[in-house]
Amino acid sequence: MMAKIAVVFWSGSGNTEAMANAVVEGVKKGGAEAELIRVGDFSADRIADYDGVLMGCPACGTEELDETEFEPFFAEAEGKLAGVKVGLFGSYGWGGGMFMETWTERTQEAGANMVADGVTCENEPDDDALARCRDLGAAMAKAVG
Ligand SMILES: Cc1cc2nc3c(=O)[nH]c(=O)nc-3n(C[C@H](O)[C@H](O)[C@H](O)COP(=O)(O)O)c2cc1C
C-alpha cells in the first residue's frame, strides 16, 4: 500500500496555503499519497493514522504559531509526535523566519524525526520557495518509502 502523508496547515491570507499545495505536489511526485487538511478539520489523535505529517503555519503573534487553531492543535500534538516523521513549513512577514527555530525545537523535543529542515519564505512564496516546498514533500515521501 502507498504511504499516506497528512499535510496539515493554517493560513490567514493564503501564503502558507500556497506552500502547502506545493508540499503536496512534492509528496505525490515522490511516490506517496498526500491529504491536504486545514488544521481546523484535523486533530492530534489522527496523527497515528498517517505514515508522516507535514505541518504548515505562518509566523503569528510575536514569532508564534497561530493562536486560534494551530497552537492549540500543536500543543496537543507535542504529546503524540514521538518517533513520527515530521516536516515543517510556513510563511513570515518581517522576522526572517525566527518562529521556525522555536517551532523546530519544540518538534524535536517532542521526539519527532524531522525529515528535513523547516521551509520558510517571506510573504507569498516565489518560484524558489515553491521549489523548496516541493523538495520538502519529496523528502517526506523518500523517508516513508
Ligand atoms: C496578527 C499577525 C501577526 C504576525 N506576526 C508576525 C511575526 O511575529 N513575525 C513575522 O515575521 N511575521 C508576522 N506576521 C506576518 C505573517 O507571518 C505573514 O503575513 C505571512 O505571509 C502570513 O501567511 P499566511 O498568508 O499563510 O497567513 C504576522 C501577521 C499577522 C496578521
Image (spheres, rainbow, N blue to C red):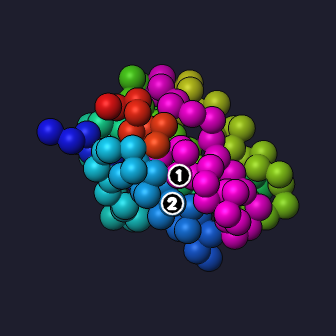
Q: Secondary structure at mark 1?
A: helix
- Compute the Cα span from label 2 to label 1: 5 Å
* Residue 47 locus on image (x, y percent): 31, 42
Magenta stretch encompasses residue 77: no
* Residue 21 locus on image (x, y percent): 47, 64
Q: Characterize the local packing of mark 2: few (<14), some (14-19) or many (20 or more) Cα atoms within 10 angstroms.
A: many
* Residue 59 locus on image (x, y percent): 69, 57
Task: Write down the region rendered in magenta.
Answer: 111-137
Q: Toward the viewer: 17 or 11?
A: 17
Q: Characterize the local packing of mark 1: few (<14), some (14-19) or many (20 or more) Cα atoms within 10 angstroms.
A: many
Compare marks 2 and 1 and give the one earlier in the sequence: 2
Q: Are marks 2 and 1 in contact (CB under 8 Å)?
A: yes
User: Which amino acid type is shown beneath numbered disc 2?
Assistant: Ala
* Residue 118 locus on image (x, y percent): 63, 41
Mark 2 CB lies closer than 8 A to ligand 1: no
**Residue located at (28% from left, 50% from top):** 33
Residue 70 disc label: none
Question: Which residue is at the far left?
Answer: 1
Magenta stretch encompasses residue 122: yes
Residue 134 disc label: 1
Question: Which residue is at the far bottom?
Answer: 13
Residue 22 disc label: 2
Q: Height in image: 22 above or below 2? A: below
User: Which amino acid type is shown beneath numbered disc 1?
Assistant: Arg
**Residue located at (52% from left, 30% from top):** 114
